[in-house]
Image: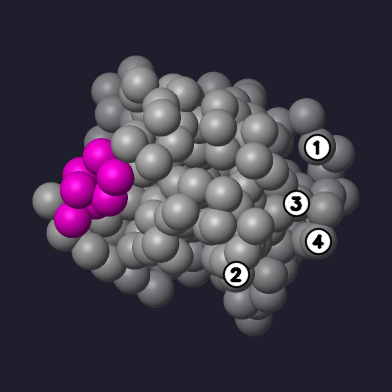
Amino acid sequence: MTARVILADADPITRLGLAQLAEALPAVIVGETGTGTEAVALTTKHQPDLLILEAIFPDISGMKVLEQVSEAAASTRVVFLSTRDNPTYVARSIVLGAKDYLTKDLNNDRITTSLRRALDGEQPLSTSPFRKLAAVLDRSRDRGVLQEAQLTYREYQLLRHVGLGLSNREISRSLEISIETVKEHVQNILRKTDAADRTQIAVWAVQAGII
C-alpha cells in the first residue's frame, strides 16, 4: 500500500532528497512546504499517513507544528528529520507524540528504514537516541536515587523530565497532571536536591545517573 506523505523542511534541496527516498517506502508526496504554519495547514487538509518534519522554521517551531497536528490530524505519524540533535529536542518530540527523531547526517538506508518502521507502527531502531530517551522517560524507579534524595516516585519522574529540559507545560502533558502540580513537585525537588534552579536539577540528575 502506498503511503501518503507530507514533507516540511525549509531547505528545498532536503525536500527533493526526501521525495526521492520516499519512493522506496513506497509513498506519494501529497504536499511539501518550507514553513511551519503551512505544514500545519497541509497536514490538517490532507491527513497524510506520515509527516516528515524539521525542528526549526522561520515562522513557528517544529515542536509547535507537532503539537498542533497531533490534535488536527491525530492519525498522522510524525517523524523529525533535523540538524538539531539536542536531547531536549528529542525528549520534547517524544512527549508531543512523534514516532522518531532522526538527524540529517544519517545515511539514506537508515532514514528509509526508520520512516518505514514509523509507518508500520513499529518502534524505532534499538540504536535510535529517540528510543533510548523514551526508555529513560519510562524507566522504573531507581531505589538508590529515591532513598538518597528522599524523593517520591512522582518527584523522580519529574526529575527525569526536568533534567531533559522539558517545560512545566510539557511535563504536565507527559505525566497527565496539572501545571500547578508540576510546579509544586519542582519546588520539592529543588529543596530535596539542594539545587538553586532547574539547571542545577539537570546537573544533579546527570550526576545521579538518572538521565
Which one is in front in this view, the residue at disc 2 or the one at disc 4?
2
* Label 4 crowd (10 A; few <14 / some 14-19 / many >=20): few
Residue at which label 2 appears:
140
Query: Mark 3 touching mark 4, by CB under 8 A?
Result: yes
Say left or right for 171 vs 149.
Answer: left
- Report the disc number at residue 106: 1
**Quadrant for the C terminus in the image:** top right
The type of colouring in the image is one colour
Residue at which label 3 appears:
128
In percent of the image, x 44 and y 36: which residue is there?
193
Query: Mark 2 touching mark 4, by CB under 8 A?
Result: no
Which one is in front in this view, the residue at disc 3 or the one at disc 1?
3
Q: Which residues are magenta?
A: 181-188
Cα–Cα span, label 3 and label 4: 5 Å
Which one is in front in this view, the residue at disc 1 or the one at disc 2?
2
From this viewpoint, which residue is outermost toward the left?
180
